[in-house]
Image (cartoon, rainbow, N blue to C red):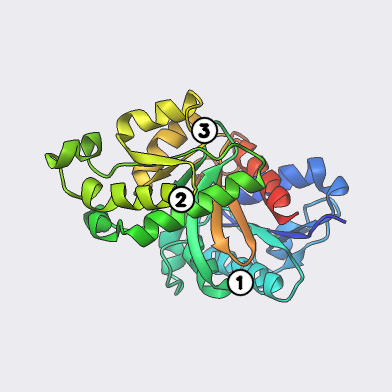
Amino acid sequence: MRPRLALTCGDPSGVGPELAASWLREHGASHPEVVPIGPASWLAGLAGTPGLAVGPADFAAAPGRPTPEGHAVALAAMRRAADGCQAGEFAGVVTGPVSKAGLAGVGFAHPGQTEFFAERWGGEPVMAFAGGRMTVALATWHIPLSRVPAEVTPARIRAAAESLDRLLARLGRGRRIGVCGLNPHAGEGGLLGPEDDAVVRPTVARLAAEGMDVAGPLPADTAFARHLAGEFDGLVALYHDQGLAPLKSVDFAEAANLTLGLRFVRTSPDHGTAHDLAGTGRADRRSLDSALRLAAELAR
């Protein structure tokens, strides 16, 4: 029997509900373990797929027109999914894209969904992306760039590398890992910044001494080309845009977001709410397909 997975609607006025509905129409009958969570008006249009309703019974969203009521529904869906995992109802969650600013306006106290699920479930979260040509884990993510050097610590580098190593093993892939440097040219021997030699290099050396197949710090401007060429099976990037700018340039339609290090599986598409595309039929579903496929694989 396949583990049950919650599929949250995300922002009801974004592309999440229509992409989820498309997947359910195509696969729902053969995948009854995927349970959609969202407003009753959305569930009513899912061609008989059983789901869990949240929010006011009379709520209806307009594509491309976000509202505080819609953000509250998105939050309610996240809470229901998190509670369902803790109660043994689900093995994991695939989350639809939400508006971080919109959620903040209705009392959401977290930078994103990653931090929300980490608080609800416990564990040490690591944000990662997989499902396409690249596999990347982040040592830091939703923080201002000005804070990155201080937050790139041995503990964060270790957590990202170890989580990535476990992910690659669970996916049955090779486990050669590269760790990006923080500064241009990985610091150029200290000429372009001290952090790579003082923090990154000794941490990577310790991981290698413990048996991990890991190298670094690597100049980030060539690390991703080396990953694509097959020299590495995954990369650790030290901050959000260092990892996601190249990954989304290559894998925007294929990769999925994974939160590693938690008690339960959590994945999501790697894109946002795309309000400008909502209701047009032009949104690309492939990242959601990857998120659902990876969640099912990891939950098993």
Image coordinates for residue 151, horizontal then vertical, percent: 29, 60
Asked which secondary structure carries label 3, the reply is: helix
Residue at mark 3 to residue at mark 2: CA–CA distance = 21 Å
At 49% from the left and 47% from the top, the residue drawn is 212
Identify the residue at the far left of this view: 191
Left or right, residue 204 beside residue 297: left
Decide: few, some or many residues near mark 2? Use Cα within 10 Å; few <14, some 14-19, many ≥20.
many
Tell me the quadrant of the picture where the C terminus can be found.
bottom right
Image coordinates for residue 216, horizontal then vertical, percent: 35, 40
Image coordinates for residue 124, horizontal then vertical, percent: 49, 66
User: In terms of depth relative to the viewer, which is nearer, 34 or 134?
Assistant: 134
The residue tagged 2 is 161
Residue at mark 1 to residue at mark 3: CA–CA distance = 29 Å
Identify the residue at the far front of this view: 209
The residue tagged 1 is 79
User: In terms of depth relative to the viewer, which is nearer, 198 or 184?
Assistant: 198
User: Which amino acid type corresponds to the residue marked 1 in the rendered image?
Assistant: Arg
Q: Who comes first in sequence, dot 2 or dot 1?
A: 1
User: In terms of depth relative to the viewer, which is nearer, 77 or 3?
Assistant: 3
At 42% from the left and 56% from the top, the residue drawn is 158
The residue tagged 3 is 251
At 15% from the left and 45% from the top, the residue drawn is 193
Left or right, residue 30 beside residue 84: right
